[in-house]
Image (tube, rainbow, N blue to C red):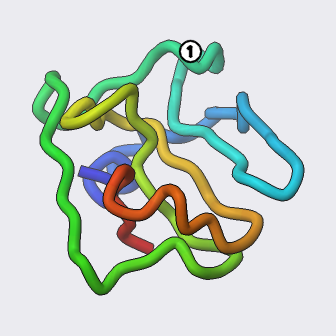
Amino acid sequence: NFLALCASGYYNNCTFHRNIKGFIVQTGDPTNTGKGGTSIWNRKFEDEFKEELKHNARGLVSMANNGPNTNASQFFITYGAQPHLDLKYTLFG
């Protein structure tokens, strides 16, 4: 999903609509409101967790969501370790 959206230019002109010092910066909504975005399947998709992947450093990329299995196009980048996000947000980069 993420790579296909990148390759298609979907994220062009997206701003970082959420920036919380010491926590995360978030983007991936082409409406730049924080309320938009869709996946390549035009629907929400399931979380993909791996026990060994942890939000344990700065610069990690995860899908943003509104609860279990609600991933679309928005993603965030961590400013530091955020262990409370483990197994709640799909970590992929």
Q: Nearer the viewer, residue 44 or 84?
A: 84
- Secondary structure at numbered mark 1: loop
Residue depicted at 71% across the width and 48% down the height: 25
Among all residues in the image, which is located at the extreme bottom? 52
Expressed as whole percent of the image width and height from the top left, the position of residue 35 reads 51, 13
Q: Nearer the viewer, residue 68 or 84?
A: 84
In the rendered image of this protein, does residue 41 appear above or below residue 2? above
Residue depicted at 64% across the width and 34% down the height: 13
Expressed as whole percent of the image width and height from the top left, the position of residue 54 reads 44, 77
The quadrant holding residue 82 is bottom right
In the rendered image of this protein, does residue 45 appear above or below residue 75? above
Residue depicted at 24% across the width and 35% down the height: 68
Q: Amino acid at mark 1?
A: Thr
The quadrant of the picture occupied by the C terminus is: bottom left
Expressed as whole percent of the image width and height from the top left, the position of residue 42 reads 16, 23
Residue depicted at 76% across the width and 65% down the height: 79
Crowdedness of circle 1 by 10 Å Cα count: few (<14), some, many (20+)? few
Tell me how many marks there are. Answer: 1
Expressed as whole percent of the image width and height from the top left, the position of residue 67 reads 33, 30
Kindly identify which residue carries mark 1: 31
Among all residues in the image, which is located at the extreme front? 84
Q: Nearer the viewer, residue 90 or 32?
A: 90
Instruction: From the viewer's perspective, tell me whether residue 65 is left or right of residue 17.
Output: left
